[in-house]
Amino acid sequence: MCLVAIVVFPLLNALVKFLLSNDYSIVQIMWMRSVVHMVWMVGLFVPYGGLRILRSNRPGLQLFRSALQLVALVLYITALSHVSLTAITMAFFTAPLMVVALSVPMLGERVGPRRWAAVAVGFAGAAVIFRPGGEIIHWSFLLVLGAAAAYALFQIQTRQLAAQDDYRTTAIYTIIVALVATTAAGPFFWTWPTELVHWGAFIGLGVFGGGGHFLVIKAYQYGRASVVGPFDYGQLIGAAVIGFLWFGDVVDVWTWLGAALIVASGIYIARREAVQGGGRGPKAHL
């Protein structure tokens, strides 16, 4: 699940950047993604699970998680319109480090001194990426950090909900706040796509977005947040390849060095958890 997700999300981000480059608004992009995501999730789950999967045991927590996703999306897409796909993907991977740190106070998971040291190394890598004179200018740096923080909290809520709601319920609730918000604002920002490839890109937003989050939700049913989170680093490979082939992105050696520190810290964290026999999280009620 994690391996497929790390391919799907770079494709999603590439489609967003492609549509931004063709002068479509952030609101329209998010609305189309939300609509396709919701149609796909409801069409996939309701026929087999019935309307009962629309009922949550923790509706407030579900809506809070969905709102966090909306915040992360707005900040991330805004930054993506100014920064290369590869660089912003690298910078965004402060989020899994935050997940490891937040798993202690919010989930009661134990993180030893070695993993804390690995988290520190990862943030040092982020500092190299965000260095003065780097590609990511100061205000985009703040946007990326804000998006990473919101996404880290979103992942923590995903883990908390795994034991309380059916994963299909969580998948449907994921996009509901973004859908309501962008539906209200959408008519003021709408531009009709004029090319078939643009329609395909808009549909792809929902397909990849919904599919990616579905896989992440399933992964968090069976693994600890401090283990599943670092797997996100695999997106760096997909983003680098797609960014170069599609947008001609070329990343400097310092940014790669920072990314290497982040990846190394993530791999070490996952390895330490495996060596210590890290158990699986509680399964959701299916």
Image (tube, rainbow, N blue to C red):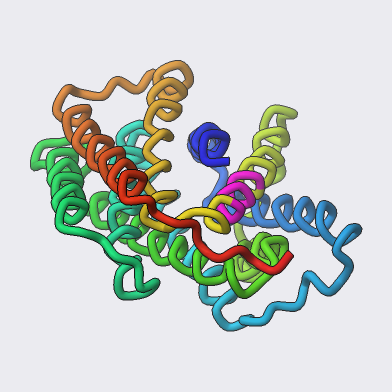
Can residue 284 be seen in this snapshot?
A: yes
Taking the image as shown, residue 83 lies to the left or right of residue 37, namely left
Where's residue 171, x and y in %?
Answer: 66, 60
Rendered view: 227 above or below 187: above
Q: Which residue is drawn at 41% across and 33% down?
A: 234
Where's residue 94, x and y in %?
Answer: 28, 50
Q: Tell me the quarter of the picture where residue 48 sits.
A: bottom right
Taking the image as shown, residue 280 lies to the left or right of residue 121, namely right
Q: Tell me the quarter of the picture where residue 257 sits.
A: top left
Rendered view: 162 above or below 74: below
Camera-side residue: 198 or 283?
283
Taking the image as shown, residue 6 lies to the left or right of residue 101, namely right
Q: Residue at x 81, y 57 (%)?
A: 45
Q: Residue at x 52, y 76 (%)?
A: 64
Where's residue 214, x and y in %?
Answer: 64, 51
Q: What quarter of the picture does the C terminus occupy? A: bottom right
Magenta residues, dominant SS class: helix
**Number of numbered discs present?**
0
Camera-side residue: 8 or 160?
160
Magenta-highlighted residues: 211-218
Q: What quarter of the picture does the N terminus occupy? A: top right
Residue 154 belongs to the span the image colors magenta = no
Rendered view: 83 above or below 209: above
Where's residue 241, x and y in %?
Answer: 42, 20
Camera-side residue: 231 or 113?
113
Residue 216 belongs to the span the image colors magenta = yes
Rendered view: 182 above or below 164: above
Can residue 70 be seen in this snapshot?
A: no
